[in-house]
Image: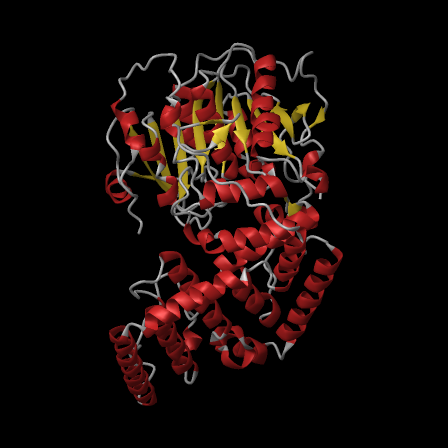
């Protein structure tokens, strides 16, 4: 499942001579791939009905879930051998838990009973020694056996489509998570011990936490402690000026801190699903401040938080009013210089689209392209694919038609399900049963500062990229004409994170066979956010990196893991060195804005403050 499919016509790019012609003639019309299908026309009554369904089901398409369940159940019914295996597995589990319960009766502190099933290495739910005491040891071992049985029951059934198998298996895991003995006071020995030692004060504190969270949720206030991280006062404080404002973004130019700077400026394109200042958090972990200190002129896009007025803004608007408007402004402030462009998450996907369009049109204003956790092939997008099929997208489109945008709550619900233990159950136990509220930090406060997505753009994003994979197939249209990533010419630096649940690293790695340019691929520990916010000096940080020279052969993910050397520490200095090696000799810093793009206000600007 993790092995990429063999390259199609995209592989031909690697056979291109090292010096391709400057002008490429357009392909014949007969060879032009058909464009990706657009959203179907919908009856207004259908839209209203499906929007009501979405509100009732928390934006989960019941028909999609039903189809997955029927597919699984029907094929399981037609697999008597598989059913017999499941019966035998249930009998084996019953024997093991019975023997374990018996051995527990004769166990002693010096000779504990051997577990009948070990939890997965990453499972921390039952790690506390209190779970080894009776009857909690039998409880959690029974629960783990039940998880193993349902995993076997929902996977490996011939005839079930992979998507339906993933949906059913995921649904079973979520339902089992609800029943975990660790989630409830009477069956959690750690909570019981705390309750006894604190004389119930933990439950009183937990009730206070629950009441406070409910009040904040109802009144639209940020989580407790987030007020200590105000934008422009505590976070997003790197000095700079807003030098351009469009209906979709503000462009920030940061003030230099070195006597000379590299002549090629850096443009950062964050995702508009998040606010830009994840890359400019506190002074000690700000990537923007780090780049400025390394002698770069840094520009960063700050996207507008869209509302109903931006409902019809599409992907092309984000290209033209976002990336290309920023590139034009940089060209006016730093004329005659190529730009190092870096894109994060969806911003990286937008950057790759823009770069391919520029290559198609012989626009050579980019010096390099850097992608942070950005996918360019969406055939294996990880567990997010669970929420993306025709039924789910249609339901979301109906819901967005009412408001003109996708709310932050709708997106947050999907991410909470993907990491239900970390984001839901462990928080419930820790804050409401143990009575312990973890201290707020800058990354948590940023994560609570949510944004919206315009209806038209989000529909195009889901349909053209996730459902139809138009970008990697050469069917994505920019300006009415298809683009191909095989046309890219700029050296590229690509960062993926080891435990990313939004852009899995093996999916990000597929850039290797979509383009033949010089490519340095970096895999760092951490997740989608914490792996990128990885400042030098932060403990327990490491990464692997390997260069793929231009026009060299494809390196499969498992081969890459074996060949890429490991480095301790942050990947930031590695990226800085890579950029400097592709930059000219230092020169005097450019002005903060000029007559063509005058400074409008101080950073962080006004769009980032919109709620």
Task: Describe residue 332's horizontal placement relative to residue 569 as left or right.
Answer: right
Query: On the image, which quarter does residue 244 sit in?
Result: top right
In the image, residue 317 lies at what x, y percent?
60, 30
- Residue placed farthest to the right in the image? 219
Quick check: can you spot residue 237?
yes
In the image, residue 322 lies at what x, y percent?
60, 28
Query: On the image, which quarter does residue 581 sit in?
Result: top left
Question: In the figure, 161 relative to 546: above or below?
Answer: below
Quick check: can you spot residue 124?
no
Name the residue nearer the viewer: 361 or 219.
361
Residue at the spot 37% in from the left edge and 77% down from the top edge = 141
Question: In the figure, 240 relative to 411: above or below?
Answer: above
Task: Describe residue 357's horizontal placement relative to residue 321 as left or right.
Answer: left
Name the residue nearer the viewer: 441 or 29.
29
Task: Describe residue 97's horizontal placement relative to residue 178 as left or right.
Answer: left
Query: On the image, which quarter does residue 568 sit in?
Result: top left
Question: In the figure, 467 relative to 437: above or below?
Answer: above
Residue at the spot 67% in from the left edge and 16% down from the top edge = 597
Instruction: Quadrant for the C terminus, please.
Output: top right
Residue at the spot 63% in from the left edge and 26% down from the top edge = 251
């Amino acid at each position: 499942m993790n092995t990429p499919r063999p390259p199609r016509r995209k592989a031909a790019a690697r056979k291109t001579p090292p010096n391709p012609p400057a002008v490429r003639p357009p392909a014949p019309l007969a060879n032009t791939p058909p464009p990706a299908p657009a959203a179907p026309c919908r009856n207004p009554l259908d839209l209203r009905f499906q929007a009501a369904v979405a509100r009732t089901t928390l934006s989960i398409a019941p028909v999609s879930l039903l189809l997955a369940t029927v597919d699984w159940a029907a094929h399981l019914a037609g697999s008597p051998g598989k059913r017999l295996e499941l019966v035998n597995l249930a009998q084996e589990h019953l024997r093991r838990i019975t023997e374990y319960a018996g051995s527990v009766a004769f166990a002693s502190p010096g000779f504990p009973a051997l577990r009948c099933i070990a939890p997965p290495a990453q499972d921390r739910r039952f790690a506390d020694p209190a779970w080894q005491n009776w009857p909690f040891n039998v409880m959690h071992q029974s629960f783990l056996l039940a998880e193993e049985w349902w995993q076997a029951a929902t996977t490996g059934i011939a005839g079930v489509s992979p998507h339906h198998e993933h949906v059913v298996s995921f649904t079973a895991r979520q339902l089992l998570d609800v029943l975990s003995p660790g989630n409830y006071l009477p069956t959690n020995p750690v909570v019981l011990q705390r309750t006894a030692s604190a004389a119930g004060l933990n439950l009183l504190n937990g009730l206070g936490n629950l009441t406070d969270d409910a009040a904040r949720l109802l009144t639209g206030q940020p989580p407790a402690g987030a007020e200590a991280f105000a934008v422009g006062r505590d976070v997003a404080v790197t000095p700079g000026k807003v030098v351009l404002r469009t209906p979709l973004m503000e462009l920030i130019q940061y003030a230099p801190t070195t006597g000379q700077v590299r002549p090629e400026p850096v443009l950062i394109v964050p995702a508009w699903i998040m606010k830009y200042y994840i890359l400019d958090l506190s002074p000690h972990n700000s990537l923007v401040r780090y780049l400025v200190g390394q002698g770069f002129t840094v520009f960063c896009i700050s996207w507008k938080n869209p509302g109903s007025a931006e409902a019809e803004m599409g992907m092309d608007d984000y290209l033209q009013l976002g990336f290309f408007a920023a590139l034009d402004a940089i060209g006016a402030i730093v004329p005659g210089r190529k730009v190092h462009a870096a894109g994060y998450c969806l911003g990286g996907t937008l950057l790759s689209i823009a770069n391919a369009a520029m290559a198609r049109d012989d626009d050579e204003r980019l010096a390099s392209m850097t992608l942070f956790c950005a996918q360019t092939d969406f055939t294996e997008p990880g567990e997010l694919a669970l929420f993306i099929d025709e039924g789910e997208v249609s339901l979301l489109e109906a819901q967005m038609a009412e408001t003109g945008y996708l709310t932050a709550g709708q997106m947050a619900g999907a991410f909470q399900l993907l990491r239900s233990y970390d984001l839901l159950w462990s928080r419930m136990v820790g804050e409401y049963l143990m009575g312990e509220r973890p201290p707020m930090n800058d990354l948590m406060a940023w994560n609570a500062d949510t944004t919206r997505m315009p209806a038209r753009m989000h529909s195009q994003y889901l349909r053209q990229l996730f459902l139809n994979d138009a970008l990697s197939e050469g069917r994505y249209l920019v300006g009415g004409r298809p683009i191909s990533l095989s046309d890219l010419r700029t050296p590229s630096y690509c960062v993926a994170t080891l435990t990313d649940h939004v852009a899995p690293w093996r999916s990000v790695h597929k850039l290797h066979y979509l383009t033949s340019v010089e490519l340095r691929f970096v895999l760092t520990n951490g997740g989608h956010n914490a792996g990128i916010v990885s400042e030098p000096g932060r403990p327990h940080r490491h990464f692997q990196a390997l260069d793929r020279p231009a026009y060299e052969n494809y390196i499969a993910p498992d081969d890459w893991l074996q060949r890429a050397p490991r480095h301790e520490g942050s990947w930031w200095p590695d990226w800085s060195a890579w950029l400097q090696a592709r930059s000219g000799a230092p020169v005097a810093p450019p002005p903060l804005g000029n007559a063509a793009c005058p400074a409008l206000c101080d950073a962080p600007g006004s769009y980032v403050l919109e709620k």
